[in-house]
Image (cartoon, rainbow, N blue to C red):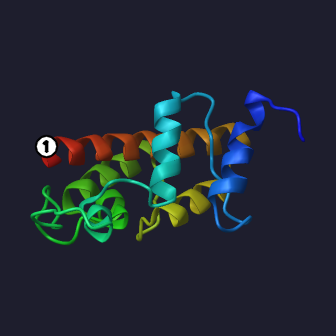
Amino acid sequence: MSEFSVKGIPERIDNSALPSASRKTNWFSCLPRKINICGWRVVGNRLPTRTNLATKGIDIPSTICPLCNDGSETVIHVFGECTSVKKIWDLIERWLNMKLPALRFPTDLMEWAENLALSVPKKEMVGAIIYVAWWQFGSFEMIQFF
């Protein structure tokens, strides 16, 4: 039996919850736990989107995105394809002065951030900004859901 440590929790979560050892969860110490957990849930498609709820048999009147009414509310749509969210990504691009990948699939976006030709602290800051954006996008969706 291995010794328990708080520092080892992210690794334990990755080992028990992720199907592939190649997928690693990013945990940013500069962010509150709730935002890190939100990022983990986004990357792993573990959010209660309308499509995920309908797939689990929960009666949802519509799976259409309430922000744009154009497409099913999936993790990919909510955090990358929704026209309302794309406008915010455009603002983030201008603020960072860097071009984000055109397709903003959560796993692709985090892989892109990890492979930037920047110092480790700057890469972590870009990753943290992505997580905070996801947190905000999720807040927009939940406001619309209720």
Horizontal and vertical percent position of residue 126: 54, 44
Q: Residue 133's x, y, as percent? A: 38, 44
Label 1: how many Cα within 10 Å (few below 14, some 14–19, many 20+):
few
Q: Quadrant of residue 75?
A: bottom left
Residue type, label 1: Phe
Q: Does 61 sit left or right of 120 as displayed?
A: left
Which residue bears the numbered disc 1? Answer: 146
Nearest the eye: 51 or 43: 51
Q: Nearer the viewer, residue 108 or 66?
A: 66
Quadrant of image for the N terminus? top right
Q: Position of residue 42 (x, y in %)?
A: 45, 54
Q: How many marks?
A: 1
Residue 89 placement (x, y as % from top left): 34, 53
On the question of residue 66 being in view, the answer is yes
**Image quadrant in which you'd find residue 87:** bottom left
Question: Which residue shows up at 32% across the image and 40% down it?
Answer: 136
* Tag 1 secondary structure: loop
> In what quadrant of the picture does the C terminus appear?
top left
Q: Nearer the viewer, residue 127 or 95?
A: 127
Placement of 118 over or under 73, stated as above or below:
above
| 12 horizontally vs 40: left or right | right
70 up-or-down from 127: above or below: below
| Residue 117 seen in render | no
